[in-house]
Image (tube, helix red, strand yellow):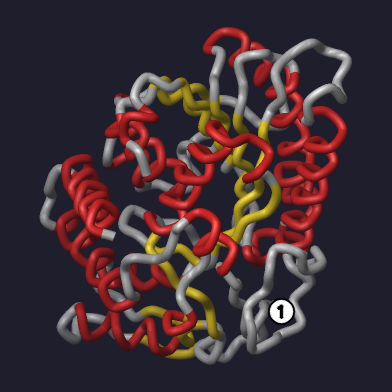
Amino acid sequence: MNRAFWKGKTVLVTGHTGIKGSWLSLWLHALGAKVIGFALQSPSSPSLFEVAAVGEKIVSIHGDVCDLAHLVRVCEQYRPELVIHMAAQALVRESYRSPVETYETNVMGTVKVLDAARQVDSVRVVVSVTSDKCYENQEWDWGYRENEPMGGHDPYSSSKGCAELVAAAYRRSFFAAGVDAVERPPVHLATVRAGNVICGGDWAADRLVPDVMQAFLEKRRVVIRYPGAIRPWQHVLEPLAGYLLLAEEMWKHGSTFEGGWNFGAEDRDARPVSWIVERLANLLDGQLQWEVSGAVQPHEARYLKLDCSKAKNQLGWSPLLNLSTALEWVVRWYQAYQEGQDMFRVTREQIERYEGLLRQA
């Protein structure tokens, strides 16, 4: 990743109040980019957006990605050069409770972000963030490649598969050179898929690591729903590094780097839920107690992982933190929060530490 590339670039980040969006906004700010955040209020309180004062470091706009007119006004006013679309309803269990809202946000929100980008001539690169769950999951023991069919058992997973199809249609119909009636340079569009991200500052409901760490902070027992479920766990900075690298390459080389990209964990870091909980309990010096829920739970995939050969071979990207180290970083973040430290500084230090690993790679 080239720090000089980002200095002075205007980047629209949708969903900047969410966990991935907050980490990305702080990283782009550290790189010298002008960040325009567009999102609803933070989905939890506390949140990284709140405790690290993300809104004070960037231009933070309260808005709904389903409001096309508002998106267009923002793009016309700030004229972003790059768009990283992260705004989403991001939880499987919430999608069972609110399927209509999930599809509205994840599908039509994507349509409207892409259409807003189409209507201004400043945008050159769009990275649309979907999910590893966009694939039609067959519970295979091997990773899904970028050319595998889209699908999804639950509304969340299905909505992410739909968002992939939307992006492909916009790329072919509007963003390629010479296909749009509007005279403008082509927009280069890629979609990106990551695994289960973990990091400090996440208080989202119904996610394993936030549930565990919140129970730790509140000194109570945590209840685990799917102890045998295997997920490809990765620190949030791993896929974010891939997104930034991909955006740079699309800017420089155009359509060569368009399409779908996987930025998942290494195979060795696909671990069951019970392993994660036990590892966190050890890192917390036995201060965590947990039990398995006996209640009937909605369907979630038992096993899902990504084949990231394309990103490794064509972008030179690869994960730098093994899962044990990633969990140590997560625990240190929450312990710093518990101690009342400056969480902007703590988060920035972890970003700088990760950048150091990038330089050594």
- In the displayed structure, would residue 202 be above or below residue 88? below
Quarter of the picture containing the N terminus is top left
Q: Identify which amino acid the numbered label 1 is placed on.
A: His
Q: Residue at x 32, y 88 (%)?
A: 278
Is residue 346 shown left or right of residue 210? left
- The picture quadrant where one finds residue 104 is top right
Q: Residue at x 67, y 79 (%)?
A: 301
Is residue 287 shown left or right of residue 176? left
Q: Nearer the viewer, residue 29 or 157?
A: 29
Q: Residue 160 in the image: x percent, y percent?
A: 72, 55
Name the residue at the top extreme: 77
State the SS at label 1: loop
- In the displayed structure, would residue 19 be above or below residue 232? above
- In the displayed structure, would residue 200 be above or below residue 145? above
Q: Residue at x 29, y 60 (%)?
A: 361
Q: Residue 294 in the image: x percent, y percent?
A: 57, 91
Q: Nearer the viewer, residue 11 or 244?
A: 244
- The picture quadrant where one finds residue 85 is top right
Residue 210 visible in the current orientation: no
Q: Which residue is mark 1?
A: 299
Label 1 Cα crowd, 10 Å radius (few <14 / some 14-19 / many 20+)? few
Q: Nearer the viewer, residue 124 or 14?
A: 124
Residue 153 visible in the current orientation: yes
Q: Residue 229 in the image: x percent, y percent?
A: 56, 86
